[in-house]
Amino acid sequence: MPRPLATLDLDLVRTFVTIARLGRFARAATRLGRQQSTISLQITRLEAALDVRLLARSPQSVRLTDAGERFLAHAERLLALNDAAMADLREPEMAGTVRLGTPEDFATSRLPEVLSRFTHAYPAVALEVTCDLTLNLLEGFDAGRFDLVLAKREPGTQSARRGVRVWRETLVWVGNTREPAEEQPIGLVVSPEPCVYRRRAIDALARARLPWRIVYTCGALSGALAAVKAGLGVAVLPRDMVPAGIELCRDVRLPALKDTEIALIDTAVLSAPAQRLKEHVVRALSRLSQDEPG
């Protein structure tokens, strides 16, 4: 007689998906607000229920097994259905429009999954997302064009008092894998003013007393990445947003770069949909950011 199929505990499934996304038990524990030993036990229980090994662990990292890769797609669908059902039953009339401003690189790397889960949970809420440079977004926010803005900022400065930090970015130099001659100015690929990364690159080179010149300026992230990939110069990017085909710079002259932050800024009075989006973004990103190396 065949063994009856087990009923999956969605709490265990959510722990598995969180570990799969973050790649480390410690980060998952921080995001879920639990002890690392607790989530380790949860994975053991889930693997026992499925009778397969989902994760291969080493002291340095965690990776999905073949069975884990197959189960991940099912797990994400289960959680999406659960979250959508809960939101529909708790707030079935939630509707409206939320105007969100965000830097382009963050929008293409971090936000798609976050916003996808929100729209599944609140299908009647329309999102108007605008991608621009941080200072332009802040000007638009002050002019009343946005309900929420994700903005890059310098940690520990006066501007850091505005908004709540939801992400911390470790910055790196990318491009030009060969080392140039010692006297050759460092060619920079930058966004137009105003741009936090442009300012960070120039300030770092000035403090290191290194010669530099801007060789390529482009307002679109795709255009800047194409210039870097073609070898026109170097650029500054968050480490975990460096795309395939772009290498870390090997020019030993380049100084280390300090971290930046992403903050969520909101208006004093938010509509119900905007408040829900704010809570969703903070919940999805804040705990993970706190566990990033600083």
Image (cartoon, helix red, strand yellow):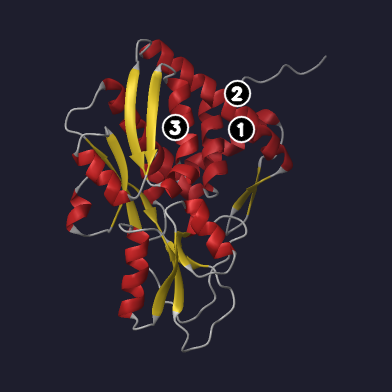
Tell me the number on the disc at residue 10.
none
Q: Are marks 1 and 2 in contact (CB under 8 Å)?
A: yes
Cα–Cα gap, marks 1 and 3: 28 Å
Kind of residue at disc 3: Leu
Cα–Cα gap, marks 1 and 2: 8 Å
Expressed as whole percent of the image width and height from the top left, the position of residue 19 reads 54, 43
Indicate the secondary structure of the residue bearing disc 2.
Answer: loop
Kind of residue at disc 2: Leu
Position of 33 relative to 12 (above/below): below
Circle 3 residues within 10 Å: few <14, some 14–19, many ≥20: some
> Closer to the observer: label 1 or label 3?
3
First in sequence, mark 1 or 3: give its number.
1
Q: Which residue is mark 2?
A: 8
Q: Residue at x 62, y 19 (%)?
A: 7
Image quadrant where residue 2 sits:
top right
Q: Which residue is mark 1?
A: 46
Expressed as whole percent of the image width and height from the top left, the position of residue 232 reads 54, 69
- Which one is in front, 3 or 138? 138
> Closer to the observer: label 3 or label 2?
3
Residue 52 placement, left or right of 169: right
Q: Residue at x 45, y 60 (%)?
A: 237
Indicate the secondary structure of the residue bearing disc 1.
Answer: helix
Q: Which residue is mark 3?
A: 115
Kind of residue at disc 1: Leu
Position of 67 relative to 235 (above/below): above
The quadrant of the rendering that contains the C terminus is: bottom left
Indicate the secondary structure of the residue bearing disc 3.
Answer: helix
Expressed as whole percent of the image width and height from the top left, the position of residue 257 reads 38, 69
Cα–Cα gap, marks 3 and 2: 26 Å
- Which one is in front, 76 or 281? 281
Expressed as whole percent of the image width and height from the top left, the position of residue 165 reads 30, 47
